[in-house]
C-alpha cells in the first residue's frame, strides 16, 4: 500500500476532531459528566491541600512528643484518606464512562463518513490513506482516552499549582544572602527554586524527546502494515498454497517486521535517554526541597512539621510544573494519533467535497433502463478510457459488453452504479424508488453470518421463505447447501469461487432486480454451468434488463445487443495500444 508521509496537524484540525461530540445531540449528558469529573478533580486537589496542612501538625506533634495531637491526627488522616479514595475511584469511573460514550459517538460518526459517498471505495482506489480500520478501531480510542486523561491531568496540575504556590510562598519564608557587600532577600524562595527546577527539567525532556512524535507515528503505521500482510495471507490462503508462495510471503512479512524492529530500536534508544533524564529528575526531586529548606530548619527558624509541609508543598508545585515531563510520552503518542486521524478525516472530507462531473438524472421514458449522453470516463490519474458514449438500454434488453482487458468495461458499470466520479457526461436511470438494481462482481461478496443472510444480501432475509430460498439454491446447482440456511459461517472461506458465483446468481433470482449488472460474474464457472445460470436469468427474469461484461463468446446467445469496446490504436504498437482510449460500437445479436 502507498504510505502517506508524516504530516503536521494544526490546532484547528485538532479542534475539528474534538469539538463535534461536545456540540452534538449528546452534549447535555457529555457536559454533565465532564463537570462532575472536574468537580471531583478539584475536590481531590482540596484534599491534598488538607493533607499538606496535616503534614505540619502531625510532624510537629512527633517533634514535640505530643501524643494527644498525634492520635487526633491519625484519626484525621484516616477519614481524609477514605474521602480521597472515594473521590479517586469515582473520578476514574466517570472518566472511563465518558470516554466510552465519546468513543461510541466518534466511531458511529466516522463509520458513517467512511461508508458514505463510497469513501471506503475511493480511498482504497486512490491510496490516500493507509489502514482505515486502524484509524477507526484504535486511533479513535486513543484520541478520546488521551484527550480526557491529558486535559484532566493538565487541569489538575494547574489547580494544584495555584493552590500550593500560595502555601509554599507563605511557609517557605525568605532567604537572604550577601553579594558584593549588598544584601539580597528572596521572598518565597522555594517557589522560585521549584520554577527553576521544573523549567530546566521540562526544557531538557522536550529537547531529548522531540523525535518521539514522528517515531510513534511510524511505529503505528508499520504495525498496521504488518497486520495487513498477515490478514492478506489468511484471505488468500488458497492461491498462495497453489503457487507455493510461502517463502515469498515470508520474505515480505520479514521485511515489514524489519521496519517494526528498526523503528522500535530507535524508540528504545530515545526512550532510554528520556528515562535517564526523567528518572534523575524524579529521584533528585525527593530530596531537593529538604536540602533547600534545611538551612532554615537547622537555624531553628522552622520546626520539623513546617519542614515536612514545605517539602510536601514543594513536591506538589514541582509535580504540577513537571506535568509536561511526566506526560511527554503520552503527548507524543496522542499527537501521532491526532495526525493519523486528521489525515483520515481530511481524506474522507475531500471525497465528500470532490466535484462529480457525471450527471445522474432520471429517465424520461419509463421503459428505459439506462441512457448515457456524451459519457466520457477516465482513470483517477486522468487517462481517458472512452469518450462521448451514447448508450441506450430498454426494459428487458440483454446486453453483452465485450472488449480487451483494461478498456473500461468494469469502469462503465461502476459509473452507472454511481461509485465512479472520474469523467463527465450524463447517466439517466429510472428513479431509485421505482427500480431494484443488483450488481454481481467477479469476486462475490458474502457477509459473515447465516447462509440465508448471504443469499438475500443486501436485502433483509425476513421476507423470503425457506422453500423459496431452497428452490433457487437447487436451481443454481447448490443442492448441498439447501439445508444450511441457518448455519453461521464465513462463507467466503467455506465455498469455492465457483460456488460463490453460483450463490450470487441465486441471490439475483431471489431479489428479482429490475436491472442486473454482471461484471465477469461467471469467470469461475465451466461453460455448461455458465450457460445454465444465464438460461435461468432469461427464463425466470424475462423482464429484467441484463447488462453483462464477459470475455467468452459462449454467452453471446443469451443477449440481444452487444456493446463492443474497440481501441483507437494499432494493436501492433503495444505501448500506445494499451493506453489509447476506446470507442463503443453498438450492434444487434440476432440468433
Image (spheres, rainbow, N blue to C red):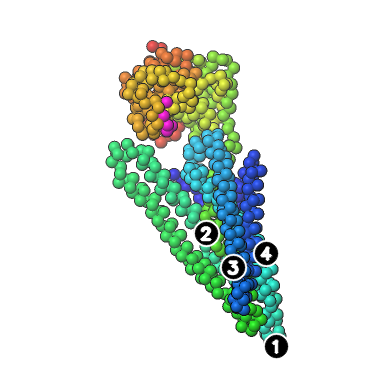
Residue 10: x and y in percent read 61, 52
Label 1 vs label 3: CA separation? 49 Å
Q: Nearer the viewer, mark 3 or mark 2?
A: 3
Label 4 vs label 1: CA separation? 36 Å
Check the image and report above or below for 29 versus 485: below
Q: Which residue is mark 4?
A: 162
* Earlier residue among tags 3 and 4: 3
Are the residues at dot 1 and dot 3 in contact (C-beta closer than 8 Å)? no
Q: Which residue is mark 3?
A: 74
Q: Nearer the viewer, residue 164 or 538?
A: 164
Q: Nearer the viewer, residue 397 or 471?
A: 471
* Residue 425 at least partly seen: yes
Q: Could you tell me which secondary element the residue under label 1 belongs to?
A: loop
Label 1 vs label 2: CA separation? 47 Å
Q: Could you tell me which secondary element the residue under label 3 belongs to?
A: helix
* Earlier residue among tags 1 and 3: 3
Q: Which image quarter: residue 574?
A: top left
Q: Nearer the viewer, residue 234 or 407?
A: 234
Residue 68: x and y in percent read 62, 73
Label 4 vs label 2: CA separation? 25 Å
* Earlier residue among tags 4 and 2: 4
* Earlier residue among tags 3 and 2: 3
Q: Residues within 10 Å of mark 2 (few under 14, many from 20)?
A: some
Check the image and report above or below for 371 versus 98: above
Residue 470: x and y in percent read 38, 20
Residue 255 horizontal side relative to residue 145, left or right: left
Q: Which image quarter: residue 486?
A: top left
Q: Which residue is mark 1?
A: 181
Q: Nearer the viewer, mark 4 or mark 2?
A: 4
Q: Which residue is mark 2?
A: 329
Q: Could you tell me which secondary element the residue under label 4 belongs to?
A: helix
Amino acid at each position: 500500500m502507498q504510505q502517506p508521509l508524516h504530516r503536521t496537524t494544526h490546532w484547528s484540525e485538532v479542534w475539528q476532531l474534538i469539538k463535534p461530540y461536545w456540540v452534538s445531540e449528546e452534549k447535555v449528558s457529555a457536559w454533565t459528566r465532564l463537570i462532575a469529573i472536574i468537580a471531583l478533580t478539584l475536590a481531590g486537589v482540596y484534599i491534598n491541600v488538607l493533607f499538606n496542612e496535616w503534614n505540619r501538625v502531625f510532624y510537629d506533634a512527633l517533634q514535640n512528643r505530643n501524643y494527644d495531637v498525634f492520635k487526633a491526627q491519625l484519626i484525621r488522616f484516616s477519614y481524609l484518606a477514605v474521602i480521597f479514595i472515594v473521590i479517586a475511584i469515582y473520578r476514574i469511573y466517570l472518566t472511563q464512562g465518558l470516554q466510552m460514550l465519546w468513543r461510541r459517538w466518534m466511531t458511529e460518526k466516522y463509520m458513517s463518513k467512511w461508508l458514505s459517498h463510497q469513501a471506503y471505495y475511493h480511498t482504497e482506489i486512490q491510496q490516500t490513506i493507509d489502514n482505515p480500520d486502524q484509524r477507526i478501531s484504535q486511533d479513535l480510542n486513543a484520541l478520546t482516552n488521551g484527550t480526557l486523561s491529558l486535559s484532566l491531568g493538565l487541569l489538575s496540575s494547574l489547580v494544584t499549582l495555584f493552590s500550593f504556590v500560595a502555601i509554599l510562598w507563605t511557609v517557605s519564608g525568605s532567604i537572604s544572602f550577601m553579594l558584593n557587600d549588598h544584601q539580597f532577600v528572596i521572598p518565597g524562595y522555594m517557589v522560585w527554586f521549584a520554577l527553576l527546577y521544573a523549567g530546566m527539567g521540562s526544557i531538557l525532556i522536550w529537547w531529548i524527546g522531540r523525535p518521539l512524535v514522528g517515531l510513534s507515528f511510524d511505529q503505528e503505521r508499520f504495525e498496521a502494515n504488518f497486520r495487513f500482510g498477515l490478514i492478506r495471507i489468511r484471505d488468500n490462503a488458497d492461491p498462495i498454497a497453489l503457487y507455493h508462495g510461502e517463502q515469498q510471503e515470508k520474505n515480505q512479512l520479514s521485511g515489514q517486521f524489519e521496519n517494526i524492529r528498526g523503528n522500535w530500536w530507535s524508540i528504545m534508544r530515545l526512550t532510554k535517554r528520556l528515562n535517564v533524564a526523567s528518572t534523575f529528575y524524579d529521584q533528585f526531586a525527593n530530596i531537593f526541597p529538604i536540602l533547600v529548606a534545611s538551612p532554615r530548619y537547622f537555624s531553628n527558624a522552622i520546626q520539623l512539621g513546617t519542614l515536612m509541609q514545605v517539602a510536601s508543598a514543594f513536591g506538589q508545585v514541582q509535580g504540577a510544573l513537571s506535568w509536561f515531563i511526566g506526560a511527554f510520552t503520552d503527548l507524543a503518542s496522542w499527537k501521532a494519533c491526532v495526525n493519523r486521524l486528521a489525515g483520515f478525516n481530511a481524506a474522507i472530507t475531500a471525497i465528500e467535497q470532490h466535484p462529480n462531473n457525471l450527471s445522474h438524472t432520471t429517465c424520461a421514458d419509463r421503459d428505459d433502463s439506462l441512457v448515457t449522453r456524451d459519457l466520457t470516463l477516465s482513470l483517477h490519474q486522468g487517462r481517458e478510457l472512452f469518450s462521448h458514449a451514447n448508450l441506450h438500454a430498454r426494459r428487458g434488453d440483454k446486453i453483452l459488453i465485450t472488449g480487451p482487458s483494461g478498456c473500461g468495461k468494469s469502469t462503465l458499470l461502476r459509473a452507472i452504479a454511481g461509485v465512479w466520479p472520474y469523467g463527465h457526461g450524463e447517466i439517466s436511470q429510472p428513479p431509485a424508488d421505482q427500480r431494484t438494481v443488483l450488481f454481481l462482481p467477479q469476486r462475490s461478496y458474502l457477509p459473515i453470518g447465516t447462509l440465508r443472510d448471504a443469499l438475500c444480501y443486501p436485502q433483509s432475509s425476513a421476507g423470503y421463505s425457506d422453500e423459496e430460498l431452497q428452490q433457487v439454491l437447487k436451481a443454481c446447482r447448490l443442492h448441498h447447501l439447501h439445508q444450511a440456511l441457518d448455519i453461521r459461517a464465513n462463507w467466503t472461506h467455506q465455498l469455492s469461487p465457483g460456488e460463490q458465483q453460483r450463490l450470487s446468481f441465486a441471490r439475483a433470482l431471489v431479489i428479482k432486480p429490475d436491472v442486473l449488472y454482471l461484471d465477469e460474474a461467471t469467470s469461475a464457472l465451466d461453460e455448461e454451468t455458465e450457460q445454465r445460470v444465464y438460461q435461468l436469468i432469461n427464463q425466470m427474469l424475462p423482464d429484467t434488463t441484463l447488462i453483462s461484461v464477459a470475455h467468452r463468446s459462449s454467452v453471446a446467445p443469451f443477449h440481444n445487443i452487444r456493446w463492443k469496446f474497440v481501441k483507437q490504436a494499432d494493436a501492433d504498437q503495444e505501448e500506445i495500444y494499451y493506453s489509447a482510449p476506446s470507442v463503443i460500437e453498438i450492434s444487434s445479436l440476432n440468433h
